[in-house]
Amino acid sequence: MTADDSLSAEDLSFQAEVRAFLDEKFDPELRAQTERQAGVFAEDTVARRWHRALHERGWAAPAWPAEYGGSGWTATQRQIFAIECARVGTPALPSMGITLCGPVIMKYGTDEQKAYFLPRMLSGEHVWAQGYSEPQSGSDLASLQTRAVRDGDDYVVNGSKIWTTNAHNADWIFMLVRTAAEGKPQAGISFLVSPMNAPGITVRPILSTSGEHELNQLFFDNLRIPVANRMGAENEGWTVAKYLLEFERGGGSLGVGLKVGLEKVKTMATQEPSGDEAALLADPDFRRKAALMEIDMITADWTDLYLSSGAGVGESVGGTAASIKKLLASHKSQEVAELAMEVLGLYAAPDQRRALGAYPQEGPIGPPYAITPTTRHINNRASTVYGGSSEVQHNILARLLGL
Ligand SMILES: Cc1cc2nc3c(=O)[nH]c(=O)nc-3n(C[C@H](O)[C@H](O)[C@H](O)COP(=O)(O)OP(=O)(O)OC[C@H]3O[C@@H](n4cnc5c(N)ncnc54)[C@H](O)[C@@H]3O)c2cc1C
């Protein structure tokens, strides 16, 4: 496997197949709608439509084992697919189902749970949300207080989750709850799943600094969750939770999106003037910055391939690699987003919110490429916080590496 384009004939033919699929299914309407997306994940209608197209082709879960409906690709094919999707800018699909909870169900779920949840996750019928963080428990997740008390064949759940991305669109949620108060905090946690439309769940929107609605606070008021909806043993949810985090932090393809993002910024720099009226792309200072970033991208790409090479299909890259990938991905993407703002100059200032989204109310202020960078930059500030902050990743690495 390589990080560049030295592909075998078989892989080139696979690449052509992917390109043909994208040409056909990622049609002009969907492309235009996706170009105006500035959130971490695409809007619900856009995401569900793209998910359906992928599922119809059997490509919704490239990283899943074939026995559960994964595409059965080699690591190189998965990389090619990720590169081609990034190249044309396909919608960012919510990761909480297929990327995060899917592997957990495969490892810890009963046969009944696998048979019920995995096909619905794969088809996109069930969109998932992640209920880990609480108002008083983020970095110190094990201190969580949402209580689940056994009552016959159910747990009765009371408490609150916060920063729950996409919960307002989700069909199901996985959550960590406290089922015992004795001993170490980690020892009394269980991993439950619930339909979002169950009585006892209230969803309150939280608007981001960018003005978008991606986040929510949830309130559980005597929510009943059947014991059959627990993944793993009671009070052993911390092990399940940590396994899921390895996919959250290390699941994606690291360098691919970054390189495409940087290319887009460079294309913008061919249109924007520098001080002396020449295109910004010719400016030595800009070129130096872009070149340094490009070197970082290549390093990130190879690091990703190295770290991911030990993991088989459906497996996690492991805790150390996951934290390194999370740190690289979040910091480098923030640098690219900042460079985009710099290139836009004055056009980074206007409020473009009415020009954003699948169904915009107005056209852009300035060139079309000025619509998304500012909102993306603001949203992207959170990437060094969500999924475990950078400081937390440094602490994990220091512990795992015995520093
Ligand atoms: C956009 C966004 C989306 C999110 N989506 C979800 C979601 O879908 N589901 C979900 O469950 N959660 C979600 N989260 C929550 C996220 O996981 C938490 O915000 C994160 O874990 C940090 O927790 P906190 O916000 O409580 O900050 P705190 O834990 O209070 O941390 C505050 C600051 O202190 C630092 N800090 C804390 N402890 C240490 C330490 N031991 N050493 C050094 N520094 C430390 C942190 O790095 C941070 O800078 C989301 C967050 C954001 C911003």
Image: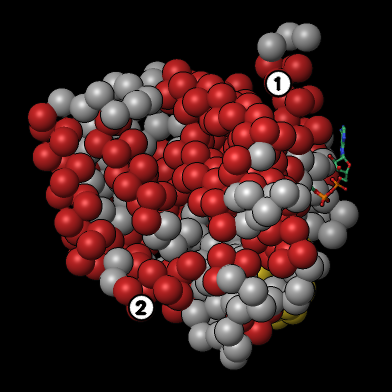
Q: Work out how far the residue at label 1 is from the one at label 2, CA to CA, in angstroms.
A: 44 Å
Residue at horizontal 81 percent and vertical 33 percent from the top: 391
Q: Is residue 79 above or below residue 49?
A: above
Give the residue type that dot 2 points to.
Answer: Glu
Looking at the image, what colour scheme do you see? secondary structure
Q: Which residue, given by chain and number where applicable, does mark 1 sit on?
A: 397
Residue that appears at 66% across and 39% down = 283
| In the depicted structure, whether residue 112 falls above or below residue 358 | above
**Where residue 147 appears, x then y in whole percent?**
75, 59
Residue 50's spot in the image, x, y percent?
35, 68
Which sits in the foreground, 126 or 44?
44
Among the 4 quarters of the image, the one containing residue 330:
top right
Label located before the other in sequence (1 or 2): 2
Along the horizontal axis of the image, is 33 left or right of 340? left
Quarter of the view holding residue 56? bottom left
**In the image, is 279 to the left or to the right of 306?**
right
The residue furthest top is 402
Quadrant in the picture for the C terminus: top right
